[in-house]
Image (tube, helix red, strand yellow):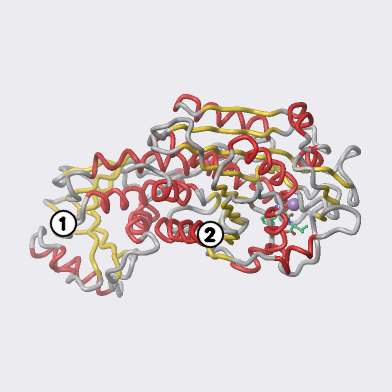
């Protein structure tokens, strides 16, 4: 990962230099430290590239710096505002530009902008987040495809930047754990190996880990979850990761629940071959929960939080569950399995029941790549949020806006809920396509106990990106980790 550090002055030697500018700034003033010819050249080059200091836009020039050809990147900050993680985007844009450029070192000079340490660390965070890649299996990468950028030094950003950095570094560790889990194929990450990775990453940080295997779950009556797993050679697991950071380690924790389908073929209601490989990331909710736990423990958050992952593989097989099968969930409610491809809600309902009985939480947030329908509704800009509580959804939405993990609230309610009634059981797991994300949420809500504040985040459109974003390359985004970290910090943490 990119090394990030902070300094009060520019270092000597070779590096690319980035200079941020607000849209109302004069470029030549931001270049005040340069000799006149270099200043004029950079300002003219920026004009020629029609650089108007738009957020994250970059104009590139080389200037003569004491006989050296110095690469100078003018980077726009846009108009003054502070939403949608603008500073992170500036750092991310610089990394995207330089990652494989041949440059090894980047200096971002904030001198004259009066940015505090917080802002400087946000720029550094964006730069580091955008540098993550998963090249493990790419044995034949060409020389020019390999990353060269190793280090970012942020100059002039407030004396407390270096101290504030450790929390951001913990956030990066969490996001990158999520991205690795999401990226690894299903022959590498299956329920048991998912658990093993989490143990490796979390136990050393003081996270308590509890794991239920098939037998333990059978004993508890988790037949909805087990039904999904019964066609797979890979055993299911229920993973609980507990972080006790509050002054009272036994105080009620916030519970996070993640859908961890390590591969979703659809089961007997099998999916079409086209694009099925994407279903290796059907554990993105569980991945985000694991990453959030990594971050919270890494920065020693003063909160009690439990992350619960419902891990299983959904396969067709001679023993697989059939459409029409009726299963009794741990809650006692029975479910007619109309479509074995609506498996996420089946594993989540038992995980929700188990977590509520085990921890008596007041707040439960679940994350799941639950429905294709949410991608039809919201595309890849917002995750869908469903909740029984206005306060909880408002806090989550604002944490989302601040971190860039954006959420859009969708409805739940009786009219939708009754669509899930079954003539032969308490409910069915799938109905018509209309409002598919909403009826899925209503299904889950049937397992939320009275008095519990609950939110369900349908992140199917957010876990994987077909094109690069501000803070990630194509592929795993790490969606949800920054959101959950911020949500805990702002709502459940002693200051
Ligand atoms: N994992 C899928 C949802 C999904 C689809 C996630 C595309 C990411 C991209 C989920 O298990 C599923 O198959 N849902 C069905 C539900 C239907 C059968 C009621 C769907 O969305 O079609
Ligand atoms: Mn499915
Ligand atoms: Zn699925």
The local secondary structure at tag 2 comes to: loop
Mark 2 neighbour class, 10 Å CA radius: few under 14, some 14 to 19, many 20 or more:
few
Residue position marked by numbered label 2 in the rendering: 467
**Disc 1 vs disc 2: which is toward the camera?**
2
Is residue 424 or residue 114 the one in the foreground? 424
Question: How far is mark 1 from mark 2, CA to CA?
Answer: 36 Å
- Judging depth in this view, the residue of 484 and 230 nearest the camera is 484
Cβ of disc 2 within 8 Å of ligand 1? Answer: no
Q: Position of residue 99 (x, y in %)?
A: 39, 49
With 190 as the anchor, is 476 left or right in this view? left
Q: Earlier in the sequence, mark 1 or mark 2?
A: 1
Q: Quadrant of ligand 1?
A: bottom right
Up-down relation of residue 168 to residue 469 (above or below):
above
Q: Residue at x 72, y 28 (%)?
A: 213
Q: Secondary structure at mark 1?
A: strand
- Quarter of the picture holding the C terminus: top left
Q: Return the residue at label 1.
A: 64
What residue sits 15% from the left and 62% below the top? 31
**Rendered location of residue 241, percent (x, y):** 55, 33
- Residue 104 at x, y = what percent? 31, 43
């Amino acid at each position: 990962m990119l090394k990030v550090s902070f300094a009060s002055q520019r270092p000597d030697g070779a590096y690319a230099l980035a200079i941020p500018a607000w849209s109302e700034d004069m470029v030549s003033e931001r270049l005040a430290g340069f000799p006149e010819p270099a200043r004029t050249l950079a300002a003219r080059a920026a004009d020629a590239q029609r650089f108007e200091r738009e957020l994250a836009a970059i104009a590139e020039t080389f200037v003569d710096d004491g006989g050296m050809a110095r690469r100078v990147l003018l980077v726009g900050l846009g108009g003054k505002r502070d939403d949608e993680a603008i500073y992170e985007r500036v750092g991310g844009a610089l990394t995207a530009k330089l990652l494989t450029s041949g440059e090894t070192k980047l200096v971002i000079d904030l001198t004259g902008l009066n940015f505090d340490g917080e802002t400087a660390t946000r720029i550094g965070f964006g730069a580091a987040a955008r540098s993550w890649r998963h090249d493990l299996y790419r044995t034949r990468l060409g020389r020019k495809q390999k990353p060269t950028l190793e280090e970012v030094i942020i100059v002039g950003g407030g004396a407390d930047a270096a101290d504030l950095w450790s929390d951001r570094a913990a956030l990066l560790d969490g996001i990158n754990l999520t991205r690795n889990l999401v990226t690894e194929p299903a022959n590498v990450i299956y329920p048991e190996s998912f658990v093993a990775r989490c143990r490796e990453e979390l136990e050393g940080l003081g996270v308590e880990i509890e794991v239920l295997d098939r037998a333990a779950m059978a004993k508890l009556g988790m037949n909805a979850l087990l039904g999904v797993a019964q066609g797979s050679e890979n055993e299911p697991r229920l993973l609980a990761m507990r972080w006790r950071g509050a002054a009272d380690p036994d105080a009620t924790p916030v519970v996070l629940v993640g859908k961890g389908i390590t591969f979703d073929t659809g089961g007997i209601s099998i999916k079409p071959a086209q694009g099925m490989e994407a279903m290796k990331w059907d554990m993105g909710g569980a991945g985000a929960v694991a990453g959030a736990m990594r971050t919270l423990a890494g920065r020693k958050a003063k909160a009690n939080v439990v992350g619960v992952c419902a891990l299983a593989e959904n396969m067709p097989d001679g023993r697989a569950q059939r459409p029409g099968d009726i299963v009794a969930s741990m809650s006692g409610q029975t479910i007619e399995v109309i479509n074995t491809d609506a498996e996420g809600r089946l594993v989540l309902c038992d995980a929700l029941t188990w977590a509520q009985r085990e921890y008596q939480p007041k707040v439960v947030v679940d994350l799941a790549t639950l429905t294709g329908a949410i991608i039809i509704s919201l595309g890849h800009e917002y995750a869908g949020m469903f909740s029984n509580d206005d306060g909880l959804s408002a806090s989550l939405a604002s944490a989302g806006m601040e971190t860039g993990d954006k959420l859009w609230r969708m409805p739940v309610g009786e009219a939708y809920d009754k669509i899930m009634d079954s003539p032969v059981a308490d409910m069915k797991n799938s109905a018509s396509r209309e409002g598919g994300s909403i009826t899925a949420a209503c299904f889950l809500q049937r397992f939320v106990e009275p008095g519990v504040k609950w939110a369900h985040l349908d992140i199917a459109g957010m876990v994987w990106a077909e094109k690069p974003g501000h803070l990630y390359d194509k592929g795993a985004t790490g969606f949800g980790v920054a959101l959950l970290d911020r949500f805990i910090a702002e709502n459940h943490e002693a200051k």
